[in-house]
Image (spheres, rainbow, N blue to C red):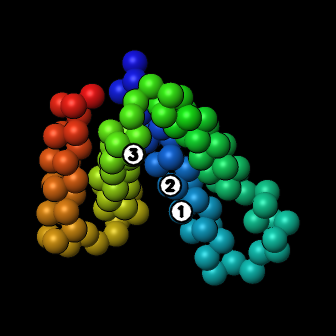
Amino acid sequence: MSLLLLLAACLLTCLGQVAQKFAVERWRGASLSWSSKLRSPWLWLALLALGAGLLVWLLVLQRLPVSIAYPMLSLNFVIITLIARFVFREPVDAQHWFGVVLVIGGVALLGQQS
């Protein structure tokens, strides 16, 4: 159950970050007022997802030692890198991919402790 909550916290925070990116992409090049920006559904989705992620994270911290739980959030780097590459078509170089592999290895090692 703790690992499912941890995965949910990761996915919710990633969803929030992606929604932020979609919000600012919609604003790029447009001369929108702050009130128009505040009515953005992407912005509200980001706030909702990040808020829910925070609440789930609090549940995670009740169940797992922070020395295990916090490094597991490194999965966010992996998920966001994949989204950046395949959704936003951003370039990701070999050094970055190597870092992703190292993060996955570290998370796998820590996952054996929980």
Classed neighbour count for the residue bearing mark 1: other residues with Cα under 10 Å, few (<14), some (14–19), many (≥20): some
Where the C terminus falls, by quadrant?
Answer: top left
Q: CA distance from mark 1 to mark 2?
A: 5 Å
SS at mark 2 in the image: helix
Does residue 44 sit above or below 54 in this rendering? below
Q: Nearer the viewer, residue 28 or 58?
A: 58
Disc 1 marks a residue whose amino acid type is Lys
Residue that appears at 14% across and 70% down: 94
Residue 11 appears in view: yes
The answer to which image quadrant residue 2 occupies is: top left
User: Residue 112, position in %: x, y?
Assistant: 18, 31
The disc at residue 18 is 2
Q: Which residue is mark 1?
A: 21
Residue that appears at 78% across and 61% down: 38
* Mark 1–mark 2 CB contact (< 8 Å): yes
Does residue 28 sit above or below 97 in this rendering? below
SS at mark 3 in the image: helix
Q: Which residue is mark 3?
A: 70
Residue 8 appears in view: no
Disc 2 marks a residue whose amino acid type is Val
18 sits left or right of 27 in the view? left
Classed neighbour count for the residue bearing mark 3: other residues with Cα under 10 Å, few (<14), some (14–19), many (≥20): some
109 sits left or right of 12 in the view? left
30 sits left or right of 100 in the view? right
User: Residue 88, position in %: x, y?
Assistant: 40, 63
36 sits left or right of 91 in the view? right
Where the N terminus falls, by quadrant?
Answer: top left
Disc 3 marks a residue whose amino acid type is Tyr
